[in-house]
Amino acid sequence: MKINPLDDRVLVEQVEEESKVGSIIIPDTAKEKPRMAKVIAVGTDEELKELIKVGDTVLFSKYSGDEIKVDGHEYLIIQRSDILATVK
């Protein structure tokens, strides 16, 4: 199944980072989820397509987006206004 976001929306997959303090691994339940994600697809807005490309890494607002699950993968669909920056 292929997902194509519309208008000013972006399909992203969150980047999971493992936290380790010394020899102790901190579980995901004990830390905040990262607000960094890899862009999977960009909506139909022409200006947005110039700013954000598939494969870019973006920072986004903490409580933004709608979670969806497709073929065992979890994604977020976020709006352009929730994207704070791109990471190079």
Image: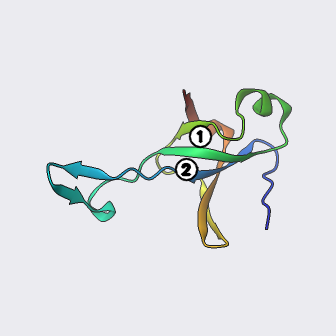
Closer to us: 64 or 27: 27
User: At 61% across and 73% down in the image, what residue appears?
Assistant: 72
Q: Tag 1: residue type?
A: Asp
Which of the 4 image quadrants contains residue 42? Answer: top right
Q: Is 12 displayed left or right of 32 in the figure?
A: right
Is 2 or 51 nearer to us in this picture?
A: 2
Q: Looking at the picture, how far across and down is residue 17, in whole percent?
A: 39, 50
Q: Residue at x 49, y 49 (%)?
A: 15
Viewer-nearest residue: 26 or 80: 26
First along the sequence among labels 2 and 1: 2
The residue at which mark 1 appears reads as 82
Q: Are marks 2 and 1 in contact (CB under 8 Å)?
A: yes
Please state the horizontal and vertical placement of residue 27, each as a whole percent of the image. Answer: 28, 62
Q: Which residue does the numbered mark 2 point to in the structure image? A: 64
Report the amino acid beneath label 2: Ser
Occupied quadrant, residue 57: top right
Q: Residue furthest bottom?
A: 72
Relative to 83, does residue 33 appear above or below in the rendering?
below
The answer to whether 53 is drawn above or below residue 67 in the figure is above
Q: Secondary structure at mark 2?
A: loop
For the residues labelled 2 and 1, the Cα–Cα distance comes to 6 Å
Dot 1 alpha-carbon crowd within 10 angstroms: few under 14, some 14 to 19, many 20 or more: some
Q: Position of residue 39 (x, y in %)?
A: 65, 44
Q: Quadrant of the C terminus?
A: top right
